[in-house]
Amino acid sequence: MKGTEFMKVLTVVDMQNDFITGVLVTKEAAAVLPNIKKKIDAYIAAGDEVIFTRDTHEENYLETNEGRHLPVPHCVKGTDGWQIVKEIDRPDCKHIDKPTFGYIHWAEQFKDSSPEIEIVGVCTDICVISNALILKAVFPETDISVDAGCCAGVTPETHRAALTAMKACQVNVIGE
């Protein structure tokens, strides 16, 4: 890593077992895993930062607002489903636990730098778009990109709709 002034940051959103092989698996999510692995390897080889987010819920998930709308317990902290997929996890990289779709403390993560930020992961139409729009709102002059070839949505249709919405909000969508 290049100290506190990172040139580029790759944010890997929620590439956890429950989304890749577990209770919320989609074939599209599993299919982007090799692309994401290559991207992580390239960022690390270049000395850039990689941050993993983890969708993080507690045992009472079904009692939460999200749990009432999506009544499928997933990514419960400490379970195998909550872990980053082992093929791509880098324990030496930063891991951020977020209890909701988008992480709201990005400003604290980058307070001493102004990086170019690229986002990959799942689900394009929920957590990827949430984090992209929060980052764009917090850092309006920063280049925020999403690699469409390294993301998967709940469905292919909602994946495409999320990419269109992000483009409208001046997030660079690459890899289409």
Image (tube, rainbow, N blue to C red):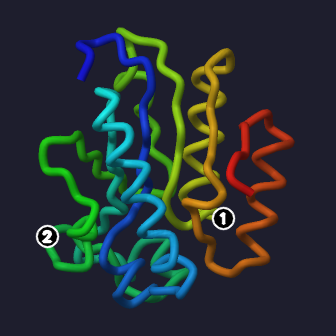
Q: In the figure, is residue 161 to the left or right of 15?
A: right
Q: Residue at x 52, y 86 (%)?
A: 26
| Quarter location, residue 163 | bottom right
Q: Say what secondary structure mark 1 lies in.
A: helix
Q: Which residue, given by chain and number where applicable, does mark 2 sit on? A: 78
- Quadrant containing the N terminus is top left
Q: In the figure, is residue 119 to the left or right of 95?
A: right
Q: Residue at x 50, y 49 (%)?
A: 102
Q: Residue at x 68, y 81 (%)?
A: 155
Label 2: few (<14), some (14–19) or many (≥20) C-alpha neighbours in 10 Å:
few
Q: Which residue, given by chain and number where applicable, does mark 1 sit on? A: 125
| Percent coordinates x, y for residue 145 in the rendering | 63, 38
| Quarter location, residue 158 | bottom right
| Percent coordinates x, y for residue 81 in the rendering | 26, 79
Q: Amino acid at mark 1?
A: Asp
Q: Amino acid at mark 2?
A: Gly
